[in-house]
Amino acid sequence: MKRISSVVFLSVPLALLPSCDKDNPDKPADTGYRHGVFITNEGGFGNSNGSVSYFDPDSIKMVNHIFELINGRSLGDVVQSMSVHGNKGFIVVNNSQKMEVVDLNTFESLGIIDGLSYPRFFLPVSDNKGYLSDGNFSGTIYVVDTDLLQITDSLQCGFGPEHLLRYGNLVLVANSGGWGNDSTITVIDSRSDEVAWTWQTGYNPTDMVLDGKDNLWVLCKGKIVWEGWTLAEETGSSIEVIDVQTGSTIRSIPVGMTGDYFWPMSLGVSSDGSTIYYLESGGVYQMDCNASTALDVPLIQGIFYGFGIDPETDLIYGLSAPTFTANGWLLRYDPAGSLIDSIEVGIGPNRVVFN
């Protein structure tokens, strides 16, 4: 296993990526930052030190704080997520209540969409349109013109909308409960920008993937009720398998126990759609898409804040955030769960975006 620090990479940030540019011979010709892996780093809450790291898996080189290096300013407070669409990157900065838009050729800022309350995730749905989830209680889906970088409409959904997933002309919204509780998925017709249905699911759905049979897998963190700082009520977490044609539940699979104080947020799927991955208190678990019960032993044992599955290689990218005052780590594993290397990233790494 190789352990690689990012300190060396930061000393020459713009000379890391192979290139044919005469002014920067290490930058890829005509590709910029359009191909590679992005890691979003939340930073410490209230400190405006959230960041994005860029990883080139071919050269095994990492550039941390790429937005600050190129734009000369902080990205903001709590970098929640990032999406890519064409030549643009959409970076959702939760506690700064905005979405930064960057040019993936240069990573220069193209503009800011602000005036948000609690933005979470952005999903492009056409050449010039995307949906942005927003809200910690009763939630909103904003319709965004990706050419003009403007909000053009809004739709109401459930409490605490999180991940969005596209299935044909439908967009599914996991209503995670936010600072309350919910047990629904909002289904939007992207042609008319209207809510078509509301599907019932387990308590507080947070993430969704489609398997190779087009069944929808929904990670539900369970019901949580706080009275002050006391946990008054809790149910175990589960994965719900849903028929995406009808919205009916095919089966429910318990994956976490009441009292483990772990509320899972991340779900993944293998490139062939046959294997599901999820985070629970023991680490990264895997499950065959035909399974009706979860395994007791994780594929990768450890404490992870997030993870991602490379859609081309099935390598597992685990994210470790030991504290929110120091840098975290990207840990890469082969599909069998053996550690390949670990590379330093920013503070509080939470999401992996493959492009």
Image (tube, rainbow, N blue to C red):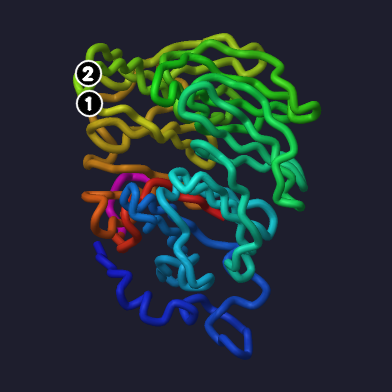
Q: In the displayed structure, does residue 51 sit left or right of residue 273?
A: left
**How far apart, in angstroms, are the residues tagged by discs 1 and 2?**
10 Å
Q: Nearer the viewer, mark 1 or mark 2?
A: 2
Check the picture and name the quadrant holding the C terminus: bottom right
Q: Which residue sits at x=66%, y=16%?
A: 245
Q: Which residue sits at x=41%, y=16%?
A: 181
User: Which of the two discs, 1 and 2, labels the residue nearer the N terminus?
Assistant: 2
Q: Nearer the viewer, residue 348 or 50?
A: 50
Q: Amino acid at mark 2?
A: Leu
Residue 335 included in the magenta stretch of the image = yes
Q: In the displayed structure, does residue 73 sit left or right of residue 133?
A: left
Q: Nearer the viewer, residue 331 or 44?
A: 44
Q: Which residue sits at x=43%, y=47%?
A: 351
Per the rendering, the mark at residue 231 is 2
Residue placed farthest to the right in the image?
192
Q: Position of residue 24 (x, y in %)?
A: 56, 86
The quarter of the displayed image where residue 115 is located: top right
The magenta segment? 333-340
Residue placed farthest to the bottom in the image?
22
Residue 302 included in the magenta stretch of the image = no
Q: In the rendered image, which residue does mark 1 sit on?
A: 261
Dot 2 crowding, Cα within 10 Å, few <14, some 14–19, many 20+: few
Q: Nearer the viewer, residue 307 or 87?
A: 87
Q: Which residue sits at x=52%, y=47%?
A: 92
Is 24 drawn above or below residue 41 in the view shown? below
What secondary structure is found at the residue carrying circle 2?
A: strand
Q: Do the numbered discs 1 and 2 sit on residues whose CB atoms are within 8 Å?
A: yes
Query: Is residue 329 visible in this depiction of the protein?
Result: yes
Query: Is residue 311 visible in this depiction of the protein?
Result: no
Secondary structure mostly seen in the magenta stretch: loop
Q: Amino acid at mark 1?
A: Tyr
Check the picture and name the quadrant holding the N terminus: bottom left
